[in-house]
Image (spheres, helix red, strand yellow):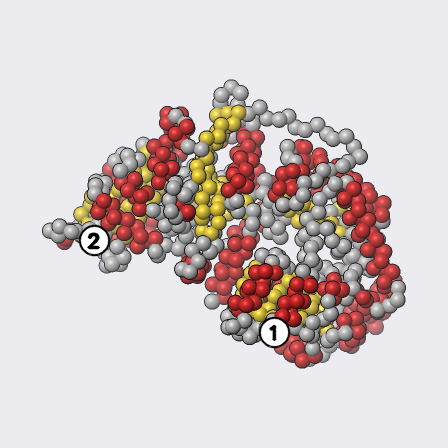
């Protein structure tokens, strides 16, 4: 999962690099703070978190110069042994500001790593806000290694937080909540009055809060947003950044008492083993702290507050939305997908304004936006110009992409907004002239028409889909009720540009999680069957496999057709209350242009399990087949499979009676109970009844020869496969686990499946997913497969990720 995240992030960063919106280097010979030069162009800099613009303040500059002249560029010693005298001065000054013990750290992140493992005991519990800063989440991994209970709640969900406190307090000494004071992406606040109430209500409850973006511009002496709203609670640990408003370097941890501070000073790992803040920046930090304590500091705060208010007023005047309007200098304007965000930012850069993107993984892929900051260098006229330009660029991009403010508002669940610009709107792109056909039952489509397009692409002929529609409807188990949608796009000449089908169904959110993670989650599902399950809208159906998306890539309007499909699927997502949209199954790395299209439209590439294909069935005899295998695999077949072959009777007749179907179903059930590599819902018995009677499916059963005379003989293995023309697709296996090791029945069934496909004239065998090594032994080659996924709500995935980290720690 971690590798998948890195791969996705790398793809998105490469796309941003290609569009010229990330990884810049400044070209300024001097720096004023108001502007920055990139690629030869001077830009008004709305990307700085130096909110109070102190980096050029003469006091701080003098502090750096004096410290460097007096003490040189570095003081290289572990703080366990010796700290520079400027450290003591800085911590004393911070103590004056906050009225509490303070420890300065080399960075805020290193402060978390020093503090959290020391103040949180193994018998405590920790609750994370899902949007708490990644540096805090990183530090909690050290707790998991010690067995500390870690849970996650939705952002600012105080009702759930209180329930968690009530649940956890019986078994844990302390219950900690980790949060941010000001959240770095959306710029919204922690609900501090509610948190203070919980601190007072529950003796076990403690708060660890990172106010990195709140320091300086808020509170008396710049103690930050958190302390501007509440006193330092005796059960609160507060962290601060000295890199943003403070305009120096490092971080600080503010403690409720001296005993806790000393314990962290004695035992904090990064205080012992990491380097210190160096003298020049200690000089800057001391000068900044003195400035914070001075009489002139309130004027600096007031000047920034006026500019922040002006920005809020202007955004409202021009109709630009905000995710949450606050008085912080950090702003987020909702925009949507990477394609929309990057297009707006590119236009803003060309117009002379530097702003940031806020997108995946900091936000969900569809709920990104334009992120910018107001700082003391910025003028009121700069704000006027930025907002007017942003409104115009925003409008242009929506029109160019045939999107709308209504669509953005719906995605973010914010009020509908209307952009107001000083220029006439540009002409929209020509509206497509494609013809859409959407049906909700295969009965509405002629069998010949459907099969001519789709029959050879997977296990979804017209007849097979008719069977699936009947099975997966009107069931008491809601997970076995799927809604089918058939979607076709043609041009004016009647040529098919796109054809596919998709379903909405309840899936397990850990479907593709590591088996160890799914085992943990299934333990929870024993008492809560719906735990970490949600509705997904996906190409195909949960039981289908193949090339679900037929698209004419040579057609000039193929992208428009694909946009229409996404629009329809999004509509179904909204109607069904789904939390995920998925397009599957694609050969990984085979189509860079399609991958880029999906990424720009907010769909993230996710690796699926590899498919295992036996593509060479050109042999005529079993010996020729064995010779077609690699030497080591040929040896494996001769040692692990062939010696057992004579112990079995094979049946290729489909089960005829209800009892025979039940026997096969029981074998499937044994595999299902053990299969966590792809964690899916159990298929209903009715499905197997229908498959056993369906012409598109082939069934192999293995019986023990030694039980031939037993009238109650039952199969010990079964394989359900789908066959169309020369393709043979193994879909579902059932095994009696009493014989799996003693008789190698799983390997035997794979071998017999290949032989069966050859015997009935097939040219390729798809052995599906998992157990790659065993499938390679019988001639399969694994191919990487991926899906493109868009999460509307990634809370469940965050929870699953926490399970994965716990499993790794264990």
Q: Position of residue 560 (x, y in %)?
A: 57, 30
Q: Nearer the viewer, residue 87 or 393?
A: 393
Question: Counting other residues with Cα less than 10 Å from the Cα at mark 2, is it few (<14), some (14-19), or many (20 or more)?
Answer: few
Q: Which residue is mark 2?
A: 643
Q: How many marks?
A: 2
Looking at the rendering, which quadrant does residue 75 occupy? bottom right
Which residue is located at x 35 percent, y 40 percent? 471
One can see residue 287 in this view: no
Residue 39 in which image quadrant: top right
- Name the residue: 34% across, 56% down: 673
The kind of secondary structure element at disc 1 is loop
Q: Position of residue 437 (x, y in %)?
A: 49, 27
Asked whether residue 169 is in view, the answer is yes
Q: Is residue 479 above or below residue 695?
A: below
Q: Residues within 10 Å of mark 1 (few under 14, many from 20)?
A: few
- Disc with the residue nearer the chain's start (2 vs 1): 1
Q: Is residue 179 left or right of residue 290?
A: left
Q: Is residue 120 above or below residue 623?
A: below
Instruction: Determine which residue is flagged by label 1.
Output: 203
Q: Which label sits in the foreground, 2 or 1?
A: 1
Give SS at disc 2. helix
Left or right of 538? Residue 62 is: right
Q: Position of residue 279 (x, y in %)?
A: 78, 70
Q: Give the Cα distance between marks 2 and 1.
A: 68 Å
Q: Residue at x 55, y 47 (%)?
A: 791
């Amino acid at each position: 999962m971690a590798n998948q995240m890195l791969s996705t992030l790398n793809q998105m960063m490469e796309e941003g690099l290609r569009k010229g919106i990330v990884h810049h280097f400044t070209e300024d010979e001097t720096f004023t703070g108001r502007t920055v030069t990139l690629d030869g162009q001077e830009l008004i800099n709305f990307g700085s978190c130096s909110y109070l613009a102190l980096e050029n303040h003469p006091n701080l500059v003098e502090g750096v110069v004096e410290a460097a002249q007096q003490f040189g560029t570095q003081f290289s010693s572990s703080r366990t042994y010796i700290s520079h005298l400027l450290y003591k001065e800085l911590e004393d000054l911070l103590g004056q500001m906050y009225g509490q013990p303070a420890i300065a750290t080399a960075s805020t992140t290193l402060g978390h790593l020093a503090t959290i493992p020391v103040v949180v005991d193994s018998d405590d519990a920790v609750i994370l806000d899902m949007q708490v800063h990644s540096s805090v989440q990183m530090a909690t991994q050290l707790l998991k290694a010690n067995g500390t209970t870690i849970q996650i709640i939705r952002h600012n969900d105080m009702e759930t937080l209180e329930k968690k406190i009530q649940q956890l307090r019986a078994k844990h000494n302390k219950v900690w909540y980790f949060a941010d004071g000001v959240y770095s992406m959306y710029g919204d606040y922690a609900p501090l009055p509610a948190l203070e109430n919980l601190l007072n209500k529950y003796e076990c409850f403690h708060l660890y809060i990172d106010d990195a973006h709140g320091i300086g511009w808020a509170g008396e002496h710049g103690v930050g947003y958190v302390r501007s709203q509440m006193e330092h609670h005796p059960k609160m640990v507060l962290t601060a950044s000295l890199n943003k408003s403070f305009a120096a370097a490092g971080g600080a941890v503010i403690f409720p008492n001296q005993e806790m501070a000393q314990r962290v000073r004695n035992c904090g790992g990064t205080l012992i083993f990491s380097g210190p803040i160096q003298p020049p920046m200690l000089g800057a930090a001391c000068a900044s702290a003195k400035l914070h304590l001075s009489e002139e500091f309130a004027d600096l705060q007031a000047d920034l507050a006026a500019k922040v208010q002006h920005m809020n007023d202007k955004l409202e005047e021009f109709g630009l939305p905000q995710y949450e309007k606050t008085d912080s200098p950090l702003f987020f304007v909702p925009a949507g997908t990477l394609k929309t965000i990057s297009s707006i930012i590119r236009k803003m850069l060309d117009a002379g304004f530097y702003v940031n993107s806020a997108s995946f993984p900091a936000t969900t892929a569809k709920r990104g936006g334009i992120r910018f900051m107001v700082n003391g260098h910025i003028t009121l006229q700069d704000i006027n110009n930025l907002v007017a330009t942003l409104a115009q660029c925003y409008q242009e991009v929506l029109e160019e992409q045939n999107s709308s403010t209504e669509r953005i508002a719906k995605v973010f669940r914010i009020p509908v907004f209307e952009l107001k610009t000083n220029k006439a709107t540009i002409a929209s792109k020509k509206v497509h002239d494609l013809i859409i056909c959407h049906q909700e039952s295969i009965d509405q489509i002629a069998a010949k028409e459907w099969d001519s397009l789709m029959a050879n692409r997977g296990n979804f002929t017209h007849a097979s889909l008719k069977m699936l529609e009947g099975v997966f409807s009107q069931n008491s188990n809601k997970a076995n009720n799927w809604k089918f949608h058939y979607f076709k796009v043609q041009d004016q000449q009647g040529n098919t540009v796109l054809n596919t089908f998709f379903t909405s169904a309840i899936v397990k959110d850990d479907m593709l999680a590591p088996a160890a993670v799914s085992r943990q989650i299934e333990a929870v599902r024993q008492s809560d069957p719906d735990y970490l399950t949600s509705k997904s809208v996906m190409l195909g159906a949960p039981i289908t496999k193949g090339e679900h998306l037929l698209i004419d890539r040579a057609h000039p309007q193929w992208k428009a057709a694909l946009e229409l499909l996404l629009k329809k699927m999004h509509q179904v997502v909204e109607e069904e209350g789904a939390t995920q949209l998925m397009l599957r199954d694609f050969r990984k790395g085979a189509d860079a242009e399609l991958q880029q299209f999906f990424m720009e439209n907010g769909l993230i590439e996710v690796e699926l399990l590899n498919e295992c294909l036996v593509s060479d069935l050109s042999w005529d005899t079993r010996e020729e087949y064995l010779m077609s295998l690699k030497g080591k695999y040929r040896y494996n077949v001769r040692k692990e499979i062939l010696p057992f072959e004579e112990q079995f009777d094979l049946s290729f007749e489909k089960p005829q009676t209800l009892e025979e179907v039940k026997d096969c179903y029981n074998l499937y059930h044994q595999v299902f109970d053990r299969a966590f590599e792809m964690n899916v819902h159990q298929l209903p018995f009715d499905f197997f009844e229908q498959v056993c009677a369906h012409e598109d499916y082939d069934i192999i059963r293995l019986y023990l020869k030694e039980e031939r005379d037993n009238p109650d003989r039952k199969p010990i293995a079964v394989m359900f496969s789908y066959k169309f023309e020369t393709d043979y697709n193994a879909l579902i296996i059932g095994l009696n686990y009493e014989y799996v090791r003693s008789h190698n029945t799983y390997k035997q069934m794979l071998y017999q499946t290949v032989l069966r496909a050859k015997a009935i004239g097939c040219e390729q065998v798809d052995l599906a997913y998992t157990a790659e090594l065993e499938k390679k032994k019988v001639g399969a080659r694994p191919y990487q497969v991926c899906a493109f996924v868009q999460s509307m709500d990634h809370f469940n995935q965050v929870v699953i990720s926490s399970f994965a980290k716990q499993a790794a720690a264990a």
